Image (spheres, coloured by chain):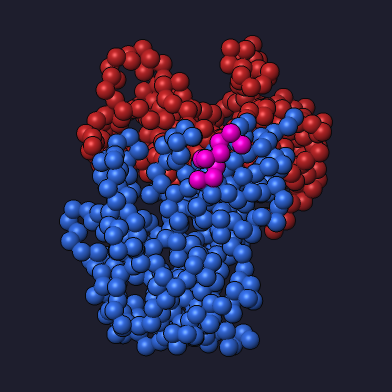
Amino acid sequence: MELVNPIIIHATGGRGDILCAEPAIRYSINNVFTTSNIIVIATEFPVFFEHLAADTRINVLPPAFVGNNLDLFEGYKVFTTYEHPTASKKGLLHANMHSVDYSSLQLLGWLIPELERYVQLKAPQPEEIEIVEAKFKHFGVDIRNTLLLHPGETWPSRTIPVEWWSSFLENYKGSTCVIGAVRPDNKPLELELEDTEKHGYMPGLLDLGDSCPSLANYLNMRELIVAIALSKGILTNDSLPVHIAGAFNNWLFTFSTARRFTTLRPYRPHAKNFLRTENFATKCLFPPSHFNPIFTTGRYDLLPEGVTSILDVIVDAKTVAEKISKLLNDTLKINLFTS
Amino acid sequence: MNSNLKEPLLILTVGGLGDLLCAEPVLRFGVQEVFTESERIVIVTKNKDIYKHLSNVDDNLFDNRISFITEEELYRDLKSYIGYAICTIYDHPLYKKKGFIQGAMHFTDYASIYLLGRLLPENKKSIFIQPASVEEEDIVIEKFENLGLDIHETLLIHPGETWPSRTIPEDWWEEFIKNYKGQMCLIGENRPIHIPLMTESPSRIPEETNEPHRDYIPGVLNLNVTIPSLIDQLSFKELVVAIELCKGIITNDSLPVHIAGAVSNWLFTFSTAREWDNLKPPGYSYGIYHNLAISCFYPASHFRPTKLIGSVDLIPEPYTNIKEIILKPKESIDLINQSWN
């Protein structure tokens, strides 16, 4: 019996969600859709899937191309990794699940094996490394000896204020550099949507002034991936850098304020304990009871009642600076010892 | 759009007994962590023994919100439940289908995404069974003593008769029993006389296949052996106690598997119809749960999300016998003895 042939997979959602769809798509291609000889992945971020393109069955296309040429895809079986107008709703609470698990359930209706749930990205190539090193060097930064900072401006429930970042920079003695993308001048943080029940954001970057070097807006997505892979580590409050860092297993420091850390921490193959992560949130703002599957129980992008500042649920900047310095120095010692 | 969270809740639990037991951590998490504002929670179940501890917060406090009814009682008095929010742990006629594939997942995960729309945290996935009292233990110990057995030194043998894809043939069990050198006792529950193992339900034929839907009433095999037997002699609670106190259990059915997991005792089973990761009890009791199957008829990749591709109850081609994918009896005995040594 010929099974599911050909197919199109819509990989949608936020950038972090699309990256988190990579394990489910990779596993499906290799283990489930084995008899499909044409597999189209429709996504805004083909860079997350370029390592899969060695399989000649795979075509990675922009969603706009698919939308404008629907007749080309007549007869295709349609799959999605996120809620999508072409798929039935499954009633999953995305904010209360790991995005890798969510994608797997959306795509396949089941969970891929635990050891397959890690994000894989194409390894940095020599010529890419050369370009990225040169870009950082231009700003006087040795990327391999630098902690990257990503002070993301996003939902209030996960945006860390500028004063916290400034205090961190005052206390952290190592090399740092800001990365990320600034929101275009005329775009507001919170989008105005026709459906007033829904809320959307265009994430950006906080302005930390001249307190440390910045390559904001200087790196394309692939260069961002390479930079994170080469750096000593990254401190971020946004999910995309979290999952990129998870793909390379260098130091990841983050703040799991808006979801439980177990649903944010990147999965790793074989050795979860080897993942070098530290969560500097002291608690998650939204307990399980906030997410009731029967009723809509409120927004999780805002600070909940009773919390006046996100600073109430994260570790103070000085302590974080000291902790990161220690962890990075200890790692250096271990590396020297083992080499 | 904040609804009235105090609205009463009807939780429908359906599935085999193993499935109901696997859903226990999910219902517990739901009642204690999610549905905290619901003033009344009615759990519809065919076996309230599995869940009755949920209404007992501790030895002194009772969660008065929770009550239990059977599905028959629900349908008999359906009007009384108008206005209740309905949720389920499984596909149910009163609830929309969600498109998850149960055969390719651990049932605890399946029930969790069905009931709560999320997965439980890893450290919340273990099944809880109310511990037995000393009196309850004494009753079970005495039942074994009456057969000349020390329960703590006894291997329980549960030769379940169930789907062909997970029924281990009589001759395998007979050879195992003949060669095992320790105390043994048969357990299980016979199917009522005149009830067939399998019935076909033509009205429920999936549209995309020509295959009839098959329902099974599990039982135990009638083995030609002369070892002690407590088949049909143990209540559900006594079964739990027996599995907790015994030296270990060998079984091919999911209910004893999950009881052994809940009480953290030695378990030897055959994960032939689903992947071992999707059957073994959650938690970190490494070394005490063993799979005697060397392969699985239906790996997760067998399941396509858009197409029905057949049932999982039969032995698939090119296999002809389940013995092709399980350890031989003597190999199983060696493994059990090595584990215990």
Q: Main secondary structure of the magenta part?
A: helix
Residue B124, percent from left and from top: 43, 50
Q: Which is nearer the eye, A16 or B230? A: A16
In the image, A68: left or right of A312? right
x and y percentages locating residue A296 in the rendered image: 29, 39
Where residue A186 sits, quadrant-wise, is: bottom left
Q: Is residue B329 above or below residue A125?
A: above
Q: Which chain is red?
A: B
Q: Which of the two residues, A260 or A188, is positioned nearer the viewer here? A: A188
Residue A165 showing in the rendered view: yes
**Residue at left offset 35%, top offset 67%:** A182
Image coordinates for residue A154, horizontal then vertical, percent: 32, 60
Vertical position of residue A194 compared to residue A203: above or below: above
Please name whichever residue, A96 or A66, is drawn nearer the observer in this view of the structure: A66
Q: Which residues are magenta?
A: A64-72
Q: Position of residue A152 (x, y in %)?
A: 34, 66
Q: Quadrant of the C terminus of chain A?
A: bottom right
Is A65 a magenta residue? yes
The answer to whether residue A331 of the structure is visible from this angle is no
Quadrant in which the N terminus of chain A is drawn: top right
Identify the residue at horizontal 56%, vertical 59% (top origin).
A47
Q: Is residue A240 above or below residue B260?
A: below
